[in-house]
Amino acid sequence: MFEKTLKKRTTHLSAAQTIMAGFACMIFIGALLLNLPIASKSGESVGFINALFTATSANCVTGLVVVNTMAHWTLFGKAVLLLLIQIGGLGFMTLITAAMVLVRRKISLRSRQTIQTSFNQDNIGGMVRLVKRVVLITIVFQTAGAVLLTLVFLSSGTMSLPRAIGQGIFHAVSAFCNAGFDNIGTESLVPLQANIPFNFIIMALIIAGGLGFNVWTEIVRIIKNKERRSLRFRLRRLSLHTKIVFTITGILIFGGALFFLIIEWANPNTLGGMPIWEKIQASLFQSVTLRTAGFNTIPQDGLKEISQFVSCVLMLIGGSPSGTAGGIKTVTLGIIIISMISVIRGRSKLEAFGRSLPLDLLQKALSVASIMVIVVFVSATLLHFTELDNPYPHTFLDLLFETCSAAGTVGVTTGITPHLSDAGKIVLIICMYVGRLSPITVVVALNKKLRAGDDSIGLPEERVIIG
């Protein structure tokens, strides 16, 4: 009787609820494995709250840690982290579907609907084909990244071949999945801030993962197109989605890099003591990592307050849809900006790149952004009270920075993460979970009354005064 009831309940889960439950299960399993004494070099359990925090950070591809990855975890623990990062970056349904395709099992309609929700697709058709492309793109980027990083580590002359390969694989997966976990030391990637090949390989992997699989699928299709057309013609045929992604991503990366270069130029705690080329590289890396990667080559606690605040904004924006990054996404910001421009121009429609956009996209974009801001505001306020007696010196801006990093699934920190109280860690666990799933997915999953067509019967319309 119990089994029938359980089966009935699980089969009635919506796609959003299935995704939410899947991530929760993976986090819980990961926490149990990381809590085992075999996962810690000390041979002692790290504690369930710390294990849960780390598992959430890995599966939600965030990168916030309460213990140093290199110093604390054994090979077993790091393998669990890497697996959680990979599953979290691609989504558990992607890997399950890929496994079913390999053994030639039929993919059910329900599974296709879950994949559709996971990648925010409009149509249910072609979901299995999409999964194949996602897996192939991931393998190509991570393999190329692992090979190149292995060569970089070998060229340093401080690592053996097996260790260089291990480090190459770990950082390639972590960078492409925008996870931000590093296995270098206690200062993230600060010791490698002058290593040009390493920095640009990591940045390339971060951007590749953050652009979204839809964008890469379209790029591959255009490259494969055998029509003898000019590159300019092919670029003009890119979808509106891809054009918005490239435009907003480019503005955020280069605009952010220029901002940090100017503001932090003479700051002795960050860029002050570097040569010019290294300042430019570090500024660019800082801007790229805030796309939700979580690595850092300059100390985040050394940033000026205005730089920390701008970092919070960039972290909340994050990467692009259907990728490995978190945040409200670049397209969400793009839709809001397009709406603002339309209002300023006195137009009633959303228009960009010679196309018009439906108004329901603006409603969804505003909802995502608003919910994320509320989550961050409430969480930062809760952290203020949970950390009142915390002996680690911090300001409210540090807590806001931490909250934005968690909700945006970024992973950079000013240093307070290991010193948080258990209550504070739980607050950030929730932030990371909501940030990875996206606020809309969580709201839809929790709202059992939400059904398509509920608004078919309209109420009387009445206007209000705005502004």
Image: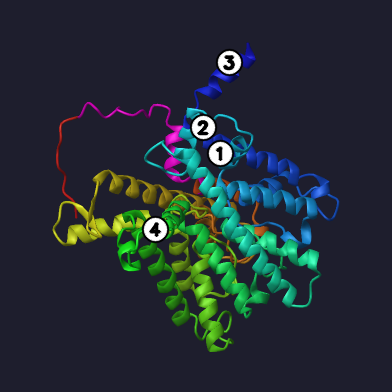
The circle on residue 111 is 2
The stretch of residues the image draws in magenta is 436-458
Colouring used for the render: rainbow
Three-letter code, disc 3: Thr
Q: In screen coordinates, is 31 left or right of 268?
A: right
Per the image, the residue denoted by label 4 is 226
Q: Are marks 2 and 1 in contact (CB under 8 Å)?
A: yes
Three-letter code, disc 1: Met
Q: CA gap, disc 3 to disc 1?
A: 24 Å
Whether residue 426 is visible to the viewer of this picture, yes or no, is no
Q: Residue at x 74, y 47 (%)?
A: 34
State yes or no: residue 444 in magenta.
yes
Give the mark nearest the N terminus, 2 or 1.
1
Q: In screen coordinates, is 103 left or right of 35?
A: left
Per the image, the residue denoted by label 3 is 5
Q: Quadrant of residue 448?
A: top left
Q: Residue at x 79, y 44 (%)?
A: 36
Give the mark nearest the N terminus, 4 or 3.
3
Where's residue 198, x and y in %? 63, 73
Three-letter code, disc 2: Ser
